[in-house]
Image (cartoon, coloured by chain):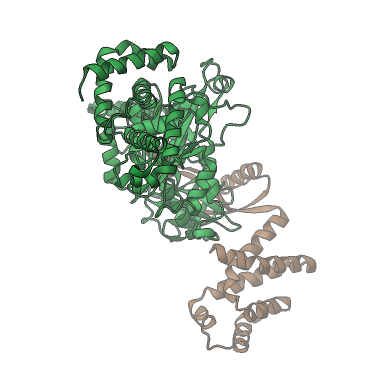
Amino acid sequence: MSELATLARPYAEAAFKRAKETGNSQEWSDALAFLSAAIQDTDLSAIINNPKVSEDRLVQLMQEICQDQVKGEGLNFLKLLIENSRLYLAPQIAELFESYKAEDEGYVDVDVITAYALTKAEEKSFALSLKKKLNKDVNIHASVDNSLIGGFLVRAGDSVIDGSISGQLQQLAKRI
Amino acid sequence: MQLKPSEISDLIKKRIENFDVNVEAHTEGTVVSVTDGIVKVHGLSQAMQGEMLEFPGDSFGMALNLERDSVGVVMLGAYKHITEGDTVKCTGKILEVPVGEALLGRVVDALGNPIDAKGEIDAQEMSPVEKIAPGVISRQSVDQPIQLGLKSIDAMVPVGRGQRELIIGDRQTGKTAIAIDAIINQKGTGVKCIYVAIGQKRSSVANVVRKLEEHGAMAHTIIVCATASESAALQFIAPYTGCSMGEYFRDKGEDALIVYDDLTKQAWAYRQMSLLLRRPPGREAYPGDVFYIHSRLLERASRINVDEVEKLTGGKVKGKTGSLTALPIIETQGGDVSAFVPTNVISITDGQIFLESDLFNSGIRPAVNAGLSVSRVGGAAQTKIIKKLGGGTRLDLAQYRELAAFAQFASDLDEGTRKQIERGQRVTELMKQGQYSPMSVAEMGVSLHAANEGFLDDLEVNKVLDFEAALQSYMKSEHADLMKKIDDTGDYSNEIKQGIQSAIETFIKTSSW
């Protein structure tokens, strides 16, 4: 996983720089997201990992799958990945690309996990206080996990803010 | 300790009362791979070098390799339950162990947890395992002796408080025995001892503990133990753990003695970790920083001055210096002192006690090679009496070594040479000493005086030890006040010299042995 991230970094950086130059980062983002979703399909990944499938055939196949989802420079990027046998890195490239994009546009993706679904107003107040804490605009992805019992858990990249009842119970158990 | 159920519930209640519910913020990562106690973790962008990382199942690891996308972690203890995808949390703390008086008399593992079934340790303080050694300004030169209680060592390779004296030799040459005698001899002197067992058999450690208990030496001793079956990481950090425990006493203006038994095994453990972490191997497959692991450890053994003690204790202890004396042990293979780790440690320490299998097997125990053993700073710290008398002993033995090869042609030698050989044989014999029977300064002084003044010359070589034993018991019963005076002052004034001389003369006239 960590090795994959290291390998994917130059591709993601290149793609992002190019996207910024041409000003169509959303298009790149969609294309990469599509690619990464496609790669994660088991049938397709079997074909990609099959050494008997030639590069040309793989390019052709990918073109057919992608149709107009990936075009122009995106298609060149796809060909490059296939040529370097790095197509399997697409999910990591997409992930890194998104993080560069988020950093550039000054927001962070934040997962907010709560025991019960948040109302719109609650989500808003979350967004406000997180913005203050992280000094960045936040893009909240809310989800529900009953095992938290109560409270919330916020995850932004590596850092985690654990305000859940289950987390506090664990802390208490450790103390006793 | 018997606890009533009500007490336990009270205890828990109190803990719950004091438990402040706070929102915990930390950094997380995911386990990518687990191999031989080395875990690779993705994420953890905030991790520090040497930080404790928390794994599921209440186990901990230490971050050693910080890379761009991953962290290389060595597990402290069990790692079999860790699987790919587990979450790892940063704790924000560098590895810490409990220190303090409460640890005396206890056997603990490399993390400071008790393993002697005597209950919890109520340690008041925690101290980081890795600390920087005291600076130049806060140090004081070594000028007080620490008596190891062995004639051959105290007379010829004296050790001062705050010195690092290496004990080096092949397997089965009595390295541990010297260290244990040194610990036993600290009974009643106020010197606290720490014995760090690294990569040893559990049975050997149990033996050491039993012997120390038998001789009443456990009360001033802490045993830190990372046995052969424990993970390489624990064997690697055990010496640093012991050192932190010793530094606690040093920083309080007391004296402490630490034995690392042995650093060869620590280097092996570190080599294992480093190779598994894929650090490039160097000479003998050790990593590049194998010198540094020992130099930074031994540099922490030091004597600190009055000002530093006052500063460290916040003014509570005044007018006292503190010291931590280190006796690292290195095991050589086939007497090869030019191997990598032995040369490193020899160059770091302030001298070495060199033990030889040949001497050991020919019955000279402790098997100290008087020619190769040196103490670079201890001379300044010797008591006057031992310093005066020890010089003669050293000289006798040095001359004897030069001539020993001719000893078999005794009949053809001139008078002077023959005398020197005979003196040498008797002094060599006198330097023998049984295990677990350390001697006081006065006892040593009397024995050395007898040798220097030629009282042994008329004895048969195999009678020397009997003579010594009889003389010691005579001195103890008839001249107790003189002995006490020597022990108290350590002087070798004319008065004391005359006292010993006349006592031995009367002893020879009146007694048999």
At which x and y percent is residue B398? 45, 38
At which x and y percent is residue B272? 45, 57
Asked if residue B467 is positioned above or below residue B402 in the image, the reply reads: above
Seen at 54% across and 15% down, the residue is B319
Q: Which one is nearer the viewer's eye here, B203 or B491?
A: B491
Residue B446 in the figure: left or right of residue A48: left
Name the tint of chain A in the rendering.
brown
Name the tint of chain B in the rendering.
green
At which x and y percent is residue B263? 44, 46
Asked if residue B478 is positioned above or below residue B201 in the image, the reply reads: above
Decide if residue B227 is in sight here: no
Decide if residue B203 is in sight here: yes
Name the image quarter holding residue B68: bottom right
Residue B120 in the figure: left or right of residue A5: left
Q: Which one is nearer the viewer's eye here, A144 or A50?
A: A50
Seen at 20% across and 22% down, the residue is B512
At which x and y percent is residue B216? 28, 26
Asked if residue A18 is positioned above or below residue B324 in the image, the reply reads: below
Q: Quadrant of the C terminus of chain B?
A: top left
Q: Which one is nearer the viewer's eye here, A122 or A33?
A: A33
Residue B496 in the figure: left or right of residue B139: left
